[in-house]
Amino acid sequence: MENDAVVGANHESRTTSTITIKGILSLLMASVGENYDDSKRVISLGMGDPTIYACFRTTSVAEEAVADTLHSHKFHGYAPTAGLLQARNAIAEYLSRDLPYQLSSDDVFITCGCTQAIDVSIAMLSRPGANILLPRPGFPIYELSAAFRHVEVRHYNLQPEKSWEVDLDAIEALADKNTVALVIINPGNPCGNVYTYNHLEKIAETAKRLGTIVIADEVYGHLAFGANPFVPMGVFGSIVPVLTLGSLSKRWLVPGWRLGWFVTNDPCGTFRKPKVVEVIKKYFDLLGGPATFIQAAVPRIISQTEVVFFQKTIDHLKHTLDICCQEIEDIPCISYPYKPEGSMAMMVKLNVSLLEDISDDFDFCFKLAKEESVIIVPGTAVGLKDWLRITFAADHSAVREGMKRIKSFYQRHATKSSKQ
Ligand SMILES: *Cc1c(COP(=O)(O)O)cnc(C)c1O
């Protein structure tokens, strides 16, 4: 579900050198085995678009809502640029369920997926000399957007040995008066982290101390299946202003509908200053949002989707994650420091010293694609060399078969001493 990005040839090298996951995936697909076993179907544990698997079909409630708004003939026209009022209201209400205060439709702007919400945030905050703090590993669309907007990127580390928590000391050291935002992704892609209430509170306090705001990418909101429940960053909106970004894409399994949101969580009114609101509104005049009939269906999609639909997705992800983790135990060259508690992806550490002729994560992924027709993302693409990102949003048999092939790949490439 990562978005591709067209990189203009006339831009600076930092734009063209930003790796997108889509870009890497297409290179990997192109190298899928010509000379090896042609009968092997390609298994992608790389891309986060689960809709290719029948087990990840959206609810008929959503399909019917969209069909009805389309057939009503009422939504063939333009929507207001900030979004249809009923959709903004429904999203405000949906997000307020988990907050200690009430959002209003004025806080909500409808975007083309969470991707556009990311780009809007960075565009809104850009100014000469601005820098933004991004997680490593992370989601490369942030780097790409920042490069186009000439916003300097400063990476802070997520800590694998601490459930991929934010390194708050590093943030204190990185930030300065030109820091415009701290970005967190929770539940996390690519790490599967689900942060505790306490950790999120500390993040909010740190951002407050540094005089910056928090951008909370909650595109995987509620896709949590471990010990920690999902807590939205907006809960701490009275400590620090929060921009909450999200979409229907992941929880409702409709990434192609391009229905996302950019939401100001700001009970103290920082964003309410007339000038700020005016700038945001004006900027949305530049953007075409998602199709009006999709927006019009949002109130029904949100209010009528049944809990069993969400539960089914979560049960499925939990199960495929378990399969992944079990299989990894049998593959000595990879290990995981943390078992994901949410989202659809995990990071595993690659130990190349156990492999005869594999130089790094890139080499591993390209040879794996060529020899086994299995696609996984090299960690370098998300900021961590010699790690791998595995997406477990696939059906059971694909995950099992994919992991089996990674195992035979390992056995074929293992150093003699590691085989013993
Ligand atoms: C998928 C994803 C997005 C993009 O969401 P869309 O709604 O498909 O645009 C943004 N952030 C993260 C972390 C994602 O995994």
Image: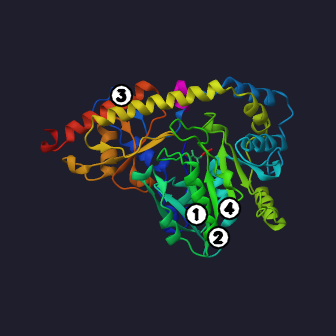
Q: Is mark 1 within 8 Å of ligand 1?
A: no
Mark 3 neighbour class, 10 Å CA radius: few under 14, some 14 to 19, many 20 or more = few
| Label 3: which secondary element | helix
Circle 1/circle 2 CB separation < 8 Å: no
Q: CA distance from mark 2 to mark 4?
A: 9 Å
Q: Residue at x 25, y 40 (%)?
A: 332
Q: Which residue is mark 2?
A: 211
Q: Is residue 41 visible?
A: no
Amino acid, disc 1: Ala
Q: Residue 57: x, y in percent? A: 59, 26
Q: For marks 1 and 4, give the CA distance.
A: 22 Å
- Mark 1 to mark 3: distance in Å? 38 Å
Sequence-wise, which precedes: disc 3 or disc 2? 2
Q: Which mark is residue 401?
A: 3
Q: Which residues are magenta?
A: 51-56
Q: Which amino acid type corresponds to the residue marked 4 in the rendered image? A: Val
Residue at 41% x, 24% y: name it.
397
Q: As shown in the figure, which amino acid type bears the numbered disc 3?
A: Glu
- Contact, mark 1 vs mark 3 (Cβ under 8 Å): no
User: Which numbered disc covers residue 146?
Assistant: 1
Where is residue 416 shown, x and y percent of the image?
12, 42
The residues bearing labels 3 and 2 have C-alpha atoms spaced at a distance of: 49 Å
Label disc, if present, on residue 65 of the rendered structure: none
Q: Earlier in the sequence, mark 4 or mark 3?
A: 4
Is residue 407 rendered to the left or right of residue 147? left
Disc 4 designates what residue? Answer: 240
Q: Residue 69: percent from the left, percent from the top?
A: 80, 30
